[in-house]
Amino acid sequence: MDILYVTSEAAPFSASGGLGDVMGALPQAVKSASPDDRVSVILPYYKKKVPESLASSFKLVTEFRFKYVWRDSYAGIYSAEMGGVTYYFVDNEQYFMRDGLYGEYDDGERFAFFSTAVVEFLFKMDKLPDVIHANDWQSALTVVYLRTKYYDYKPFRSIKTVYTIHNIEYQGKYDLAILGDIFGLDDRFRPVVEYDGCINLMKGALVVADRVTTVSPNYACELRQAYFAYGLQHVINANGHKLSGIINGIDTAYFSPDRGGEIAFPYSLSDVRDGKAKNKAAMQRELGLPIRRDVPLAVMITRLARQKGVDLLTCILDELLGSDMQFVILGTGDADYEQTLAEIAGRHPDKMRALFKFDRALSKRLYASADIFLMPSRSEPCGLAQMIACSYGTIPVVRAVGGLYDTIVPYGREGANGFVFNNYNAHELLFRVKDAISLYRNPEEWGKLITGAMTTDFSWDRSAKKYLNLYRGL
Ligand code: ADP
């Protein structure tokens, strides 16, 4: 099989969030799981973003000009090899030589150009891919173009298409007036992308793709409801027969408690109790909290956004901190949340710290030193933090939503690795954290939960096999 991923970002070349991480890891995992398949990834060449150490190995594959809407446009295709995967970079400095990846006034045009360039590049390939896997709104048009304006070119019809929703909040919505001038689609194809009075690129891909996936099975179910689907529930339901969810993995080598140098006292499952206690003492010292081995330390590492359930936390924190425990939150985002959290921390100087910065190294030290991890999300397509917490033996307390429901098995069940509550209700969160704190006082039961957490398989291998099955099925 020959699989081509189309994406607007992929780590380590250029990544701004979850999509970049997934597109960095999934193609590599697919290649490892099935070495005989050819796996490639195509993305824009953001010349200001790609680290020089990587860009210096790029090779120019081809250059061509093509008609993008009314312009005669240039595309250069560069390539690099990594782990057996070929990465192609679409070069056009007018569109991609920018300071950021997105948020530009002409994003619609930039990614319409990108999608057109991808399809035009297919004409130059020795062999067409069997599967094209596009992601989020930025590459939705690749799939749309293959099934609309390029449909008359018969060889493209045998290419199967997969489209993945990583974040349904951003759908690529534009005024219908620019359908022809920017998106290069004439009126015959208007029904494909038209939705709710405007152009909706994600909707177009949902309609024409052979299969649609999202990043957890439970989120795939939730997307059928208005509450989660940001207006697309009708399209999701009408195309439900081709929708499925495959959970993301985490980089288990990168998020591993036995990596020396990153945390003060590396540990593994065999010495987890002792390792965590030492890291906790180091963290308490670092943050100026009372140094106590026996006190449970709860942490939350998150964007400070409504989606993450920060409201629930701020409702109950004062009450929760009445217990004998310590709490640290590391996050950036909404200024109102920062202020509220700083006020609460100010009332509990011996128990709480609120740290408002994005700091990977500190996040790892916190995962390693904490006992309990809070993730009371309002919605959560997949969620990585709960899986990372598990791999450090830090017990997650999560709301049963999206991927949290799929990954965290509640205490009391076979294979338990955390605590779960159902409703978006602050006291359900409070009671579940209190359950965790009381179980922490029972070393034998707590140890079983830690074993459950640290032995749950969150590797990409499992997910890669599921994607491979999907491609083979097509
Ligand atoms: P989302 O992608 O919605 O923000 P995820 O749980 O999928 O949530 O991924 C969040 C990732 O970002 C995790 O790896 C988490 O550790 C990390 N993270 C979030 N906030 C911070 C921060 N302030 N400092 C360091 N890492 C953070």
Image: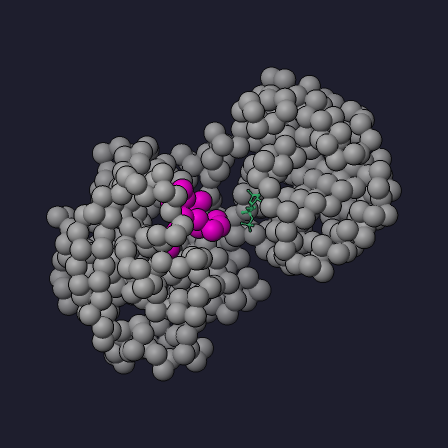
Could one spot residue 412 in this view of the protein?
A: no
Which residue occupies the foreground of this view, 297 or 472?
297
Which residue occupies the foreground of this view, 59 or 152?
59
Instruction: Please give the name of the residue rendered at 70% of the width and 40% of the height, measured from the top-left corner.
Output: 299
Q: Position of residue 166 (x, y in %)?
A: 45, 54
Check the image and name the residue furthest to the top.
270
Which residue occupies the foreground of this view, 456 or 56?
56
Count of numbered badges drawn on the protein: 0
Vertical comparison of 83 with 357: above or below: above
Instruction: Please give the name of the residue rendered at 55% of the width and 62% of the height, measured from the top-left corner.
Output: 228
Q: Quadrant of residue 142?
A: bottom left
Q: Is residue 114 inside the magenta stretch?
A: no
Instruction: Please give the name of the residue rendered at 48% of the width and 38% of the height, measured from the top-left corner.
Output: 250
Determine whether, in the image, residue 203 is placed left or right of residue 348.
left
Determine whether, in the image, residue 300 is placed left or right of residue 292.
left
Determine whether, in the image, residue 69 is placed left or right of residue 257.
left
Q: Position of residue 310 (x, y in %)?
A: 69, 54
Q: Quadrant of residue 326?
A: top right
Magenta stretch: give its range.
Answer: 7-24
Instruction: Please give the name of the residue rendered at 76% of the width and 52% of the height, measured from the top-left corner.
Output: 341
Q: Is residue 23 inside the magenta stretch?
A: yes
Could one spot residue 175 in this view of the protein?
A: yes
Q: Main secondary structure of the magenta part?
A: loop
Which residue occupies the foreground of this view, 282 or 178?
282
Q: Position of residue 88 (x, y in %)?
A: 27, 48
